[in-house]
Image: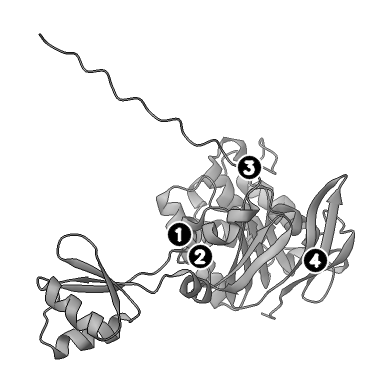
Amino acid sequence: MATASIEVRDVHKRFGATVALDGMSFVVAPGRVTGFVGPNGAGKSTTMRVILGLDRPDEGTALVGGAYYRQLRQPLCHVGALLDAGALQPGRSARNHLRWIAVSQGLSDRRVDEVIDLVGLQSVARRKAGAYSLGMRQRLGIAAAMLGEPPVLMMDEPFNGMDPEGIVWMRAFLRRLAGEGRAVFVSSHLMNELEGAVDHVVVVGRGKVIADASVDQLVRAASDGKVTIRTRAVDEARRVLEAAGATTEEGGAGTLVVSGIDAEQAAQLLGERGVSLSEISSHRASLEDVYLQLTNAAVDYRGAPPASVPEPQREVTR
């Protein structure tokens, strides 16, 4: 299978007075899962539509394997896409839905059966797709995207409607696709769904790229560098660490929160002084922490803070 990438370069797009994309630029490389994240209205879906030729940019280019989508012959053999799991004829069986798409690309019924097996819909493939749950429709959409065995996969919010088992399956499936050398591009606004699945993240807000880096780079930058130590000898541990230039603060019963020194150095110092530890751990930001930090200034729609809840009236017995 040949490899290919998605290249988005300085794309601008307006809808009337609304700026949807304002110089969007990034690359989705083969062999990794790239998460495309941002608040509602950030431009994620519009960017995907531009890549697939469904919206024409006012400026800039969006290429798949070095070509515009409209130039691709048998496009499903170059890029598979899931933008809307509800885009199907509800009275048609799942298998016939896939056969209809396969015929348009010159693909065989055997390939239809292969992708049905791939997404786990064997037992319900002859049922009408309109009766499917959202999670099942997502699987059907993924099957359609995989029909042409494309080197590039694009999925817009594929975790929507998935139950916990489905989310675990989806993460493993995305990792497997990237492991085969495909460029996998997945949008979401729920970071806990992408955690453990993506290698690289493109964070967007108000039509612009805010961050474009590996998950490890972003997490390291967002982590506060603090270390939590649990020990029965809190006072002794504090004296040893502060003598080495660290800053400490109480973290609750039997714990210290330490700044200015990493976990390995702290453990070595305390071990040399004979201070026993029951636990030592570095503070590591989650992908959701990273997302909230980066997009805080780019959120257009915020709910009002919850009203305070009054204390319940207590009945007084005299």
Looking at the image, which residue is at 63% across and 42% down? Answer: 301
Separation (CA) of disc 4 from disc 3: 40 Å
Give, as a three-letter code, the residue at label 4. Answer: Gln
Q: Is residue 33 left or right of residue 63?
A: left
Residue 101 visible (yes or no): yes
Kindly indicate whether the residue at mark 2 contacts the one at mark 1 (C-beta within 8 angstroms).
yes
Residue wearing tag 3 = 301
Closer to the N terminus: mark 3 or mark 1?
1
What is the x, y in percent for residue 317?
12, 11
The residue where tag 4 is placed is 74
The residue located at (21%, 18%) in the rendering is: 314
Q: Residues within 10 Å of mark 2 (few under 14, many from 20)?
A: some
Calculate the distance from the C-alpha at mark 4 to the C-alpha at mark 1: 28 Å
Tell me where residue 283 sits by quadrant. Answer: bottom left
Depth order, front residue of 284/9: 284
Identify residue type, mark 1: Trp
Residue at (55, 42) in percent of width and height: 134
Amino acid type, mark 3: Tyr
Checking the image for residue 169, the label placed there is 1
* Contact (Cβ within 8 Å) of mark 4 with mark 1: no
